[in-house]
Image (cartoon, rainbow, N blue to C red):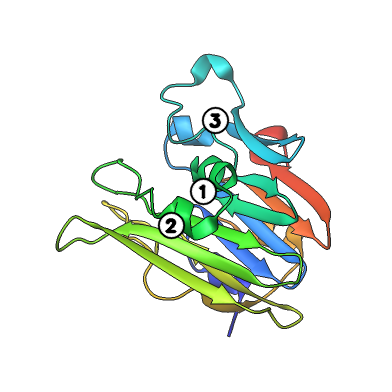
Amino acid sequence: MQDLCELLHSNPYPGRGIVVGANCVYYWIMGRSANSRNRVFTKTDDGIRTEAYDPAKLEDPSLIIYHPVRTMGDDLVVTNGDQTDTIVEKGDFRAALMTREFEPDEPNYTPRISSILHKDGSFELSILKRDPATGRCLREFFAYEQAAKGTGYFISTYEGDGNPLPSFVGEPRLVSLDSPEEVWDALNQDNKVSLYANVAGTVSLFNKNLGD
C-alpha cells in the first residue's frame, strides 16, 4: 500500500484521477494546455460540473466541459467525462459503459475512468482504454465490497507525463488516504486545476484559478 500524497508527489502528471475509500471520494483534473487549465469546478443540484474560468478563452469544450459528479438515486457517480450522464440516464453502471469508449484525442486516446459508490459502502471502478495492438477499446471493471478505514483505491488516466501520454496500467492501486488539503497540496503545482473531495458527505472544492 502506498501513501496517496507520496504517489502524487512522485508523479507530475497523472492527469485526471479518482480515489474511492471508506466514506470518501476524491476527483481531480489537471491540464497541460491553456484550454484544459481554463477550468473550475462548480456545484450543481446533484453534484458538480466543470466550467470555463474565462469563457472568452474557451476553445473546444467537447472533452473538458462535463458533469464529473452526479447522484443516481442513493448512488454517487464520479467520472472523468460525459459518461457520467450516460450512466445516470441508463441507470446501470456497466451497461452504460459498454456503450462508451476512450476519448478520441489522438495520439493520447485518453482513457475514460469511472466509479459508482453505493449506500452500503461497496463501489466499482472502471477504465475504458485503447488497446495499442488492435486499436480496440478495452473495458475493465473492478468491484469492491468495501474499503478498510483510512484506505482507498486510486485510478488515473495516465501513468505519468509523456508524448503521447501513457495510459494507466493494471488494477486500481490501494492507497492510504490523506486529507483533502493534503491531496490538493500534493498535486503538481503547475499542472493541477481542480479537486473535488467528498468526505463523509461533506463536499469541498479546490480551484487553482480561484486562488486555492
Question: What residue lies at 51% left-to-right and 48% top-to-bottom?
Answer: 80
Task: Give the foreground label among 2 and 1.
Answer: 1
State the image coordinates of residue 94 (x, y, percent, origin top left): 48, 59
Question: What residue lies at 63% left-to-right and 69% top-to-bottom?
Answer: 123
* Residue at mark 2 to residue at mark 3: CA–CA distance: 19 Å
Q: Residue furthest left?
A: 133
Apparent side of residue 121 relative to residue 29 in the rendered image (left or right): right
Task: Give the foreground label among 2 and 3.
Answer: 2
Q: Residue type at mark 3: give it.
A: Asn
Q: Residue type at mark 2: give it.
A: Thr
- For the residue pair 210 and 103, the one nearer the viewer reads as 103
State the image coordinates of residue 66 (x, y, percent, origin top left): 55, 35
Binning the other alpha carbons within 10 Å of mark 2 as few (below 14), some (14 to 19) or many (20 upward) gives many
- Closer to the chain start, of discs 2 and 1, is 1
Residue 157 — which label?
2
Check the image and report above or below for 203 versus 38: below
Residue 80 — which label?
1
* Residue at mark 2 to residue at mark 1: CA–CA distance: 9 Å
Q: Quadrant of residue 42?
A: top right
State the image coordinates of residue 23 (x, y, percent, origin top left): 77, 68
Apparent side of residue 65 relative to residue 111 in the rendered image (left or right): right
Instruction: Name the residue tied to disc 3.
Output: 38
Q: Residue type at mark 1: give it.
A: Asn
Residue 90 — which label?
none
